Image (cartoon, rainbow, N blue to C red):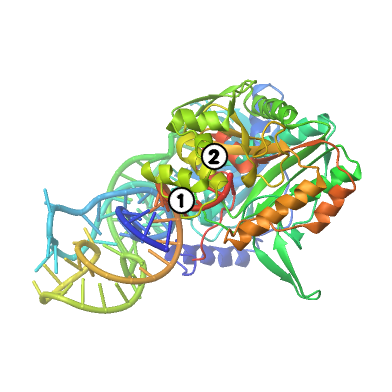
RNA sequence: GGGCCGCUAGCUCAAUUUGGUAGAGCAACGGACUUUUAAUCCGUGGGUUACAGGUUCGAGUCCUGUGCGGCUCACCA
């Protein structure tokens, strides 16, 4: 789309702008009037609340126009919807009808119209316009009135055009807002305190990811955009809040794909005096609450099928899930090289010297994740990819952790939080060893966080969920770009 | 980062199997039209075919490179 050059069509609109000004009409007046939205006017008419000669004042964008000589029909659109307008030269006069509406008003312009509501012969509820006022002139021609814009690049880069012409897209973002408010409502009702923690962090942590790096000029300090909220929220549990949550943006300096955007919205909550089992129950209850609030039912369409969010969701040990899907029992391969070898035999690309936990994670995403369409919890994860989770009492190499899946995607991750400061210190040392061995996503040591744990943190369950992915599920979208208003794109 | 696909008028799309004057609908402009529904009818203008090279008498079409986008693999959530 060319935004740089002035096309002949835009040139004509600019000429109209001059003609309007010459006629003493302000094309961008500061004020307008309005008595009803389009939807309110239609509802009031249908309810018989409007007298036959009672004028309403409507505003909106002119989106369709049918000029038939001395009468015209059109549709104006506001955020509540569209309403038909009917204009007659005999009512409006030559000046307003011919010189303004027919000659100087274009599709896309914002209008204020005043007149009574009636029903046409064809049965459409319509405003019989007696007065018309231009309240904002557009200069660029609008997208096709029927097809709108369809090319993804145009839709994302100029999202306003997408929203302007595609009602389904507007609906996605209305649902997204209800998802977020539903989560807040659930957590607020359960006594969770909403908090805000630093986005600019001197030490990043709480996830395995590469950060964005920035710099504070005056303090001459390196800062990282957060990759999670975890370590700060746990400090608040140490401080005595028992239930806290944050909804906000995380930043990860990694690849972009249909399910990854460099910045994405995350919900994390931490709850003292519970464990990962308690968090699992809360997760299915919370998601079910949101699904019910957004859709009014538990079964919703997704891709070719349906997803049923009715709790309880199946719990399946990670080892068993992988065993079933691949017939590989990773407990039979206690050393990474052996596991690596069998994976190579199966034709899975594996980098040499990948740690065992990462191999298991790869088995999960390769064999299991795409097939987990119905909500499912996988439980009991390897310790070496979970440096902040509490050890399983039964096995030293496992932690009390689960991930939730639906629609073939991971949507959440949670565990019994590690609150043993000395164990945490040791885990950080293991991460440092991995970093030394070349793992760019190894968790950096955070001594300040360990200090907080030394002051004592109660047993705590913690949880994180990608809001974008939950929204994908609840709006039946296959790409994260469809649920982020301005997804990341390369500069043109 | 690798592989595959795409980019044509303001918008949506065409353009005979290596090639022969780049078209349509909507939108715009001029005209007709007092109950239309993506109004209809008559007429007119609008293009550096993403960009840069190359092959050819001749390139939207074939070749090479670049940019942007999509899918996919790798990486990840």
> Which quadrant is home to the N terminus of chain A?
bottom left
Q: Residue A69: x and y, percent?
A: 45, 44
Q: Is residue A328 left or right of residue A398?
A: left
Query: Which residue is rendered at x = 50% and y = 56% of the image?
Result: A103
Q: Which mark is residue A152?
A: 1
Query: Which residue is rendered at x = 51% and y = 45% of the image?
Result: A359
**Quarter of image, res A190:** top right
Q: Is residue A349 left or right of residue A354?
A: left
Asked whether residue A192 is in view, the answer is yes
**Quarter of image, res A34:** top right
Q: From the image, tell me which residue sits under label 2.
A: A167
State how far apart marks 1 and 2 are (Cα). Answer: 16 Å
Q: Nearer the viewer, residue A442 or A118?
A: A442
Q: Residue A108: x and y, percent?
A: 54, 51
Q: Regarding mark 1 in the picture, which secondary structure is present there?
A: helix
Q: Nearer the viewer, residue A51 or A314?
A: A314
Q: Is residue A152 left or right of residue A298?
A: left
**Quarter of image, res A41:** top right
Q: State whether residue A375 is above or below residue A195.
A: above
Asked whether residue A80 is in view, the answer is no
Q: Nearer the viewer, residue B46 or A99?
A: B46
Q: State whether residue A305 is above or below residue A57.
A: above
Q: Residue A487: x and y, percent?
A: 56, 53
| Chain holding disc 1 | A
Q: Earlier in the sequence, mark 1 or mark 2?
A: 1
Q: Regarding mark 2 in the picture, which secondary structure is present there?
A: helix
Total marks placed = 2
| Chain holding disc 2 | A
């Amino acid at each position: 789309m060319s935004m740089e050059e002035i096309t002949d069509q835009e040139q004509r609109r600019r000429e109209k702008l001059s003609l309007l000004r010459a006629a003493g009409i302000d094309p961008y007046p500061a004020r307008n009037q309005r008595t009803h939205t389009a939807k309110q006017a239609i509802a009031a008419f249908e309810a018989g609340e409007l007298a036959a000669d009672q004028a309403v004042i409507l505003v909106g964008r002119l989106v369709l126009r049918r000029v038939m000589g001395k009468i015209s029909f059109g549709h104006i659109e506001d955020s509540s919807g569209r309403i038909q307008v009917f204009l007659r030269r005999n009512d409006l006069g030559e000046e307003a009808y011919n010189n303004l509406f027919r000659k100087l008003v274009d599709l896309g312009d914002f209008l204020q119209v005043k007149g009574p509501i009636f029903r046409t012969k064809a049965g459409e509820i319509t405003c019989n316009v007696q007065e018309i006022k231009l309240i904002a002139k557009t200069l660029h021609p609008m997208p096709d009135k029927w097809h709108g814009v369809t090319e993804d690049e145009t839709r994302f880069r100029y999202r306003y055009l997408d929203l302007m012409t595609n009602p389904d897209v507007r609906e996605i973002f209305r649902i997204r807002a209800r998802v977020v408010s539903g989560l807040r409502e659930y957590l607020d009702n359960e006594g969770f305190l909403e908090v805000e923690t630093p986005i600019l962090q001197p030490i990043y942590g709480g996830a395995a990811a590469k950060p964005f790096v920035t710099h504070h000029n005056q303090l001459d300090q390196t800062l990282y955009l957060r990759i999670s909220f975890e370590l700060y929220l746990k400090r608040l549990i140490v401080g005595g809040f028992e239930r806290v949550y944050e909804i906000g943006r995380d930043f990860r300096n990694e690849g972009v794909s249909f399910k990854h955007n460099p910045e994405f919205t995350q919900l994390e909550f931490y709850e003292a005096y519970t464990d990962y089992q308690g968090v699992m129950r809360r997760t299915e209850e919370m998601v079910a609450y949101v699904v019910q609030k957004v859709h009014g039912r538990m079964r919703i369409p997704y891709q070719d099928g349906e997803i049923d969010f009715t709790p309880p969701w199946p719990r399946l040990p990670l080892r068993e899930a992988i065993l079933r899907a691949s017939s590989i029992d990773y407990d039979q391969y206690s050393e990474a090289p052996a596991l690596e070898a069998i994976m190579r035999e199966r034709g899975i690309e594996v980098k040499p010297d990948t740690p065992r936990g990462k191999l298991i994670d790869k088995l999960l995403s390769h064999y299991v994740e795409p097939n987990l369409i119905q909500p499912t919890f996988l439980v009991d994860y390897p310790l070496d990819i979970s440096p902040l989770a509490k050890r399983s009492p039964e096995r030293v190499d496992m932690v009390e952790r689960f991930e939730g899946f639906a629609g073939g995607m991971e949507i959440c991750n949670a565990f019994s939080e590690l609150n043993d400061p000395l164990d945490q210190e040791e885990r950080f040392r293991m991460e440092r060893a991995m970093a030394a061995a070349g793992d760019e996503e190894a968790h950096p040591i955070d001594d300040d966080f360990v200090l907080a744990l030394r002051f004592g943190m109660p047993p705590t369950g913690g949880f994180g969920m990608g809001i974008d992915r939950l929204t994908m599920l609840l709006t039946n979208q296959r790409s994260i770009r469809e649920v982020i208003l301005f997804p990341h794109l390369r500069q043109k």
